[in-house]
Image (cartoon, rainbow, N blue to C red):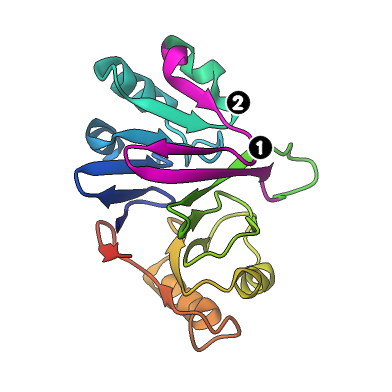
Amino acid sequence: MRLTKHTHATVTLTKGDATLLIDPGAFTPNASELLAAADAVLITHEHFDHFDADKIVAAMKDRAGLHLYGPASIADALSDVADRVHAVTTGQSFDLAGFAVETFVADHAVIHPEIPLVDNVGFLIDGTVFHPGDAYLNPGRPVETLLLPVSGPWISTEQAIDYVRALAPSRSIAIHDVMLSDTGKASTGMFLGADSLTGTPLDVLDLGESRDL
């Protein structure tokens, strides 16, 4: 499996000729191109930085075979293509274009008590790669590669360290990073990388950079 890091929390996973696209959001300038090449789309939650509804609807109208999986809360924004929008719940397992996908639903991490919580889906792909969305979500399964959120209004360094320790992945890959400067990315590696309290290697990838997993 090949993982490619795009802007913020957007990643693609490719295996053979098949591609899964996760969280094409409004911060992702090439979202339309990624949607045109994807075999299926996974959405962790409804926030605009993870879910560009207009581009998704346009792509699904252009491509009759494109299906999307995510929380029920995004259905209204995708009513024009509702027949290919699949609301997921915790504990579902399904095959998408040759990828085994398992779902875990929890609340989005708290930004502030006065900001309403939304449903957040974590996706475990092929039993090895876990995208937790915007939450320190533990799937209760072994995780080989953790896509680790590293910036944003809800991020806590203390919780992130404890989260990596709890999941004990073989490696972490930084995502949710659009708010970080180059200096901030280096600082993230210092706090959350192999030589930190996590003890787990952290890859901080450039846009478009890939890793074979």
**In the figure, 12 relative to 213: above or below?**
above
Residue 148 visible here: yes
The residue to which callout 1 is attached is: 119
For disc 1, the neighbor class at 10 Å (few under 14, some 14 to 19, many from 20) is some
11 displayed left or right of 184:
left
The residue pinned by badge 2 equals 72
Query: What stretch of residues is rendered in magenta?
Result: 81-109
Mark 2 and mark 1 residues within 8 Å of each other at the beta carbon:
yes
Identify which residue is drawn at 33% across, 42% down: 98
156 over 133 or under it: above or below: below
Label 2 Cα neighbours within 10 Å, binned few <14 / some 14-19 / many ≥20 = some
The picture quadrant where one finds residue 154 is bottom right
State the image quarter where residue 1 is shown. Answer: bottom left
Among the two numbered marks 2 and 1 on one chain, the one whose residue lies closer to the N terminus: 2
Q: Residue at x 51, y 25 (%)?
A: 86
User: How far is disc 2 from disc 1 in space, using C-alphas?
Assistant: 8 Å
Kind of residue at badge 2: Ala
Q: Amino acid at mark 1?
A: Asp
Q: Is residue 178 magenta?
A: no
Q: Percent x, y for residue 47? A: 55, 37
